[in-house]
Amino acid sequence: MAGEGVAVEFRGVSFSYPSRRGSLPVLDEVSLAVPPGRWATVIGPSGCGKTTLLKIGAGLISPDAGAVSIAGGSPAYMPQADTLLPWRDALANALLPAAVAGRPLGPARAEARALFDEFGLAGFERAYPHELSGGMRRRLALMRTLLSHRDVLLLDEPFGGLDALTRASLQEWIATVWMSHRKTILFVTHDVEEAVLLSDQVHVLSPRPARVVATYPVVLPRPRLRTDPRIAGARGEVLGHLSLHA
Protein backbone atom coordinates (compact mmCIF):
# COMPACT_ATOMS: atom_id res chain seq x y z
CA MET A 1 0.00 0.00 0.00
CA ALA A 2 1.39 3.41 -1.01
CA GLY A 3 1.78 6.01 1.70
CA GLU A 4 -0.67 8.85 2.26
CA GLY A 5 -0.54 11.32 -0.61
CA VAL A 6 1.37 8.86 -2.80
CA ALA A 7 -0.14 6.67 -5.54
CA VAL A 8 3.07 5.02 -6.80
CA GLU A 9 6.23 4.54 -4.79
CA PHE A 10 9.50 2.73 -5.54
CA ARG A 11 11.77 2.52 -2.51
CA GLY A 12 15.37 1.47 -3.05
CA VAL A 13 14.53 -0.89 -5.90
CA SER A 14 17.48 -2.86 -7.30
CA PHE A 15 17.47 -5.54 -9.98
CA SER A 16 19.97 -7.61 -11.96
CA TYR A 17 19.45 -9.96 -14.87
CA PRO A 18 21.35 -13.26 -14.82
CA SER A 19 24.07 -13.60 -17.44
CA ARG A 20 26.80 -16.05 -18.38
CA ARG A 21 29.29 -13.89 -16.51
CA GLY A 22 27.27 -13.77 -13.31
CA SER A 23 24.70 -11.01 -13.18
CA LEU A 24 23.97 -7.80 -15.09
CA PRO A 25 22.98 -4.95 -12.72
CA VAL A 26 20.15 -2.92 -14.24
CA LEU A 27 18.58 -0.90 -11.40
CA ASP A 28 20.49 0.40 -8.39
CA GLU A 29 18.37 1.56 -5.44
CA VAL A 30 15.81 3.42 -7.56
CA SER A 31 13.45 5.55 -5.47
CA LEU A 32 10.63 7.74 -6.76
CA ALA A 33 7.10 8.69 -5.76
CA VAL A 34 4.07 9.86 -7.76
CA PRO A 35 1.15 11.69 -6.10
CA PRO A 36 -2.43 10.62 -6.91
CA GLY A 37 -3.83 11.93 -10.17
CA ARG A 38 -0.45 13.09 -11.43
CA TRP A 39 1.50 12.23 -14.57
CA ALA A 40 5.11 11.22 -13.99
CA THR A 41 7.56 10.27 -16.71
CA VAL A 42 10.74 8.21 -16.47
CA ILE A 43 13.40 9.10 -19.01
CA GLY A 44 16.98 7.96 -19.44
CA PRO A 45 19.52 6.48 -21.86
CA SER A 46 18.56 3.47 -23.99
CA GLY A 47 18.99 0.22 -22.10
CA CYS A 48 19.15 1.85 -18.67
CA GLY A 49 16.25 -0.17 -17.23
CA LYS A 50 13.14 1.95 -17.79
CA THR A 51 11.07 -0.97 -19.08
CA THR A 52 12.39 -3.20 -16.31
CA LEU A 53 11.25 -0.62 -13.76
CA LEU A 54 7.70 -0.66 -15.17
CA LYS A 55 7.65 -4.46 -15.24
CA ILE A 56 8.57 -4.47 -11.56
CA GLY A 57 5.80 -1.94 -10.90
CA ALA A 58 3.35 -4.16 -12.77
CA GLY A 59 4.38 -7.18 -10.69
CA LEU A 60 5.72 -9.08 -13.72
CA ILE A 61 9.18 -9.46 -12.17
CA SER A 62 10.34 -9.15 -8.58
CA PRO A 63 13.10 -6.79 -7.46
CA ASP A 64 16.26 -8.13 -5.86
CA ALA A 65 15.93 -5.46 -3.17
CA GLY A 66 13.60 -2.65 -2.25
CA ALA A 67 9.83 -2.39 -2.41
CA VAL A 68 7.04 -1.07 -4.65
CA SER A 69 3.71 0.29 -3.44
CA ILE A 70 0.74 0.96 -5.73
CA ALA A 71 -2.46 2.65 -4.54
CA GLY A 72 -5.47 0.41 -5.08
CA GLY A 73 -3.39 -2.75 -5.37
CA SER A 74 -2.22 -3.68 -8.86
CA PRO A 75 -1.89 -1.18 -11.72
CA ALA A 76 -2.87 -1.43 -15.38
CA TYR A 77 0.16 -1.99 -17.61
CA MET A 78 0.50 -1.20 -21.31
CA PRO A 79 3.73 -2.67 -22.73
CA GLN A 80 5.65 -1.44 -25.76
CA ALA A 81 4.55 -4.43 -27.82
CA ASP A 82 1.23 -4.42 -29.64
CA THR A 83 -0.87 -6.85 -27.59
CA LEU A 84 -4.23 -6.44 -29.36
CA LEU A 85 -5.70 -9.87 -30.12
CA PRO A 86 -5.96 -10.20 -33.92
CA TRP A 87 -8.98 -12.52 -33.80
CA ARG A 88 -11.05 -10.07 -31.73
CA ASP A 89 -12.60 -6.93 -33.20
CA ALA A 90 -11.99 -3.51 -31.63
CA LEU A 91 -14.96 -3.70 -29.26
CA ALA A 92 -14.06 -7.23 -28.16
CA ASN A 93 -10.45 -6.14 -27.54
CA ALA A 94 -11.71 -3.23 -25.43
CA LEU A 95 -13.86 -5.64 -23.41
CA LEU A 96 -10.96 -7.96 -22.61
CA PRO A 97 -10.24 -6.52 -19.11
CA ALA A 98 -13.89 -7.00 -18.11
CA ALA A 99 -13.92 -10.56 -19.50
CA VAL A 100 -10.70 -11.48 -17.66
CA ALA A 101 -11.97 -9.93 -14.41
CA GLY A 102 -15.33 -11.69 -14.73
CA ARG A 103 -17.29 -8.42 -14.74
CA PRO A 104 -20.74 -8.39 -16.41
CA LEU A 105 -20.22 -7.71 -20.10
CA GLY A 106 -23.46 -5.76 -20.58
CA PRO A 107 -22.41 -2.71 -18.53
CA ALA A 108 -18.81 -3.10 -19.74
CA ARG A 109 -19.97 -3.03 -23.37
CA ALA A 110 -21.99 0.16 -22.76
CA GLU A 111 -18.99 1.81 -21.06
CA ALA A 112 -16.66 0.82 -23.90
CA ARG A 113 -19.02 2.04 -26.62
CA ALA A 114 -19.22 5.42 -24.88
CA LEU A 115 -15.43 5.74 -25.08
CA PHE A 116 -15.09 4.95 -28.80
CA ASP A 117 -16.03 8.52 -29.74
CA GLU A 118 -13.74 10.08 -27.10
CA PHE A 119 -10.88 7.91 -28.34
CA GLY A 120 -11.45 8.81 -32.01
CA LEU A 121 -12.62 5.31 -32.93
CA ALA A 122 -16.34 5.84 -33.48
CA GLY A 123 -17.52 3.63 -36.34
CA PHE A 124 -14.64 1.16 -35.93
CA GLU A 125 -16.14 -0.99 -33.17
CA ARG A 126 -16.32 -4.02 -35.50
CA ALA A 127 -12.96 -3.45 -37.20
CA TYR A 128 -10.15 -5.94 -36.59
CA PRO A 129 -6.68 -4.78 -35.56
CA HIS A 130 -5.21 -5.33 -39.05
CA GLU A 131 -7.84 -2.92 -40.41
CA LEU A 132 -6.73 -0.07 -38.12
CA SER A 133 -3.87 2.39 -38.60
CA GLY A 134 -0.95 2.41 -36.17
CA GLY A 135 -2.33 5.44 -34.35
CA MET A 136 -5.78 3.87 -34.07
CA ARG A 137 -4.28 0.67 -32.65
CA ARG A 138 -2.47 2.71 -30.01
CA ARG A 139 -5.71 4.49 -29.09
CA LEU A 140 -7.51 1.17 -28.80
CA ALA A 141 -4.75 -0.27 -26.60
CA LEU A 142 -4.91 2.81 -24.36
CA MET A 143 -8.70 2.51 -24.15
CA ARG A 144 -8.37 -1.13 -23.11
CA THR A 145 -5.86 -0.10 -20.44
CA LEU A 146 -8.23 2.57 -19.11
CA LEU A 147 -11.12 0.08 -19.05
CA SER A 148 -9.19 -2.10 -16.62
CA HIS A 149 -10.61 0.19 -13.90
CA ARG A 150 -7.25 0.61 -12.16
CA ASP A 151 -6.24 3.79 -10.38
CA VAL A 152 -2.69 3.65 -11.71
CA LEU A 153 -1.62 3.23 -15.35
CA LEU A 154 1.92 2.18 -16.33
CA LEU A 155 2.55 3.12 -19.96
CA ASP A 156 5.74 1.92 -21.66
CA GLU A 157 6.57 3.96 -24.80
CA PRO A 158 2.93 3.92 -25.98
CA PHE A 159 3.78 5.99 -29.07
CA GLY A 160 6.98 4.18 -30.01
CA GLY A 161 7.35 3.31 -33.67
CA LEU A 162 4.81 5.87 -34.91
CA ASP A 163 5.61 8.55 -37.47
CA ALA A 164 6.26 12.06 -36.17
CA LEU A 165 2.90 13.54 -37.23
CA THR A 166 0.88 10.68 -35.71
CA ARG A 167 2.95 10.83 -32.54
CA ALA A 168 2.41 14.59 -32.17
CA SER A 169 -1.34 14.17 -32.72
CA LEU A 170 -1.56 11.41 -30.11
CA GLN A 171 0.41 13.48 -27.60
CA GLU A 172 -2.19 16.26 -27.83
CA TRP A 173 -5.03 13.75 -27.71
CA ILE A 174 -3.81 11.79 -24.69
CA ALA A 175 -3.24 15.01 -22.73
CA THR A 176 -6.91 15.87 -23.27
CA VAL A 177 -8.09 12.37 -22.33
CA TRP A 178 -5.96 12.40 -19.19
CA MET A 179 -7.45 15.72 -18.11
CA SER A 180 -10.90 14.10 -18.33
CA HIS A 181 -10.06 10.94 -16.34
CA ARG A 182 -7.17 12.08 -14.09
CA LYS A 183 -5.65 8.65 -13.57
CA THR A 184 -2.21 8.42 -12.00
CA ILE A 185 0.26 7.68 -14.80
CA LEU A 186 3.85 6.46 -14.77
CA PHE A 187 5.08 6.85 -18.33
CA VAL A 188 8.27 5.79 -20.09
CA THR A 189 9.62 7.60 -23.15
CA HIS A 190 12.89 8.41 -24.92
CA ASP A 191 11.43 11.71 -26.17
CA VAL A 192 12.36 14.61 -23.88
CA GLU A 193 9.89 17.02 -25.48
CA GLU A 194 7.11 14.45 -25.05
CA ALA A 195 8.05 14.11 -21.39
CA VAL A 196 7.77 17.82 -20.62
CA LEU A 197 4.64 18.27 -22.76
CA LEU A 198 2.71 15.60 -20.87
CA SER A 199 4.16 15.35 -17.37
CA ASP A 200 3.84 16.92 -13.95
CA GLN A 201 7.25 15.52 -13.04
CA VAL A 202 10.13 13.94 -14.97
CA HIS A 203 12.41 11.41 -13.27
CA VAL A 204 15.81 11.23 -14.97
CA LEU A 205 17.68 7.92 -14.80
CA SER A 206 21.43 7.45 -15.12
CA PRO A 207 23.01 4.88 -17.45
CA ARG A 208 22.83 1.26 -16.26
CA PRO A 209 22.78 0.38 -13.44
CA ALA A 210 20.17 3.11 -13.23
CA ARG A 211 19.56 5.45 -10.35
CA VAL A 212 17.28 8.48 -10.21
CA VAL A 213 19.73 11.36 -10.69
CA ALA A 214 17.18 14.18 -10.94
CA THR A 215 13.46 14.82 -10.54
CA TYR A 216 12.30 17.77 -12.60
CA PRO A 217 8.88 19.30 -11.77
CA VAL A 218 7.00 20.60 -14.82
CA VAL A 219 4.87 23.45 -13.47
CA LEU A 220 3.54 24.80 -16.77
CA PRO A 221 -0.22 25.33 -17.15
CA ARG A 222 -2.36 22.99 -19.27
CA PRO A 223 -3.18 22.63 -22.09
CA ARG A 224 0.41 22.95 -23.27
CA LEU A 225 1.65 23.91 -26.71
CA ARG A 226 4.93 22.60 -28.11
CA THR A 227 5.51 26.10 -29.55
CA ASP A 228 5.53 27.61 -26.04
CA PRO A 229 9.14 28.76 -25.39
CA ARG A 230 8.79 27.47 -21.82
CA ILE A 231 8.52 23.94 -23.24
CA ALA A 232 11.84 24.44 -25.00
CA GLY A 233 13.32 25.75 -21.74
CA ALA A 234 12.11 22.76 -19.75
CA ARG A 235 13.34 20.40 -22.48
CA GLY A 236 16.77 22.01 -22.29
CA GLU A 237 16.94 21.57 -18.51
CA VAL A 238 16.01 17.88 -18.69
CA LEU A 239 18.54 17.34 -21.50
CA GLY A 240 21.11 19.02 -19.28
CA HIS A 241 20.48 16.46 -16.53
CA LEU A 242 20.77 13.62 -19.07
CA SER A 243 24.02 14.99 -20.48
CA LEU A 244 25.50 15.58 -17.05
CA HIS A 245 25.06 11.92 -16.10
CA ALA A 246 25.71 10.33 -19.52
Image (spheres, rainbow, N blue to C red):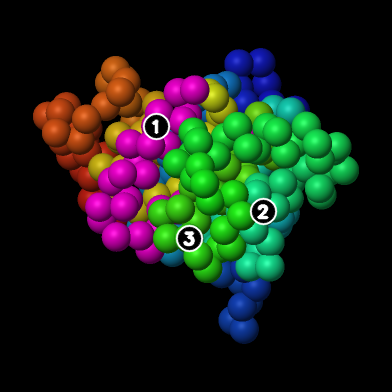
- Is 154 inside the magenta-drawn segment? yes
The x and y percentages for residue 100 are: 82, 49
- Label 3 packing within 10 angstroms: few (<14), some (14-19), many (20+): some
Label 1 – label 2 distance at C-alpha: 23 Å
Q: Quadrant of residue 2?
A: top right
Please report contact status of discs 1 and 2: CB closer than 8 Å, yes or no: no
Please report the bounds of the magenta region as a residue range.
152-180
Q: Which of these two is toward me, 96 or 148?
A: 96
Give the percent coordinates (x, y) of residue 204: 38, 43
- Where residue 216 is drawn, which disc sits there? none
**Type of amino acid at the residue the image marks with label 2:** Asn
**Would you call the spot at circle 1 few (<14 residues within 10 Å), some (14-19), or many (20 or more)?**
some
Pinpoint residue 85: horizontal percent, then vertical percent.
66, 64
In the displayed structure, would residue 233 be above or below residue 45?
above
Disc 3: which residue: 132
Disc 1 to disc 3: CB gap under 8 Å: no
Kindly identify the residue that appears in the image at 72 percent across and 46 percent down: 95
The front one of 123 and 184 is: 123
Q: Which residue is mark 1?
A: 175
Up the image or down, 40 lies above or below 35; here it is below
Q: Is residue 31 visible?
A: no
Which residue occupies 50% across, 36% down? Answer: 117
Side of 159 relative to 244 (left or right):
right
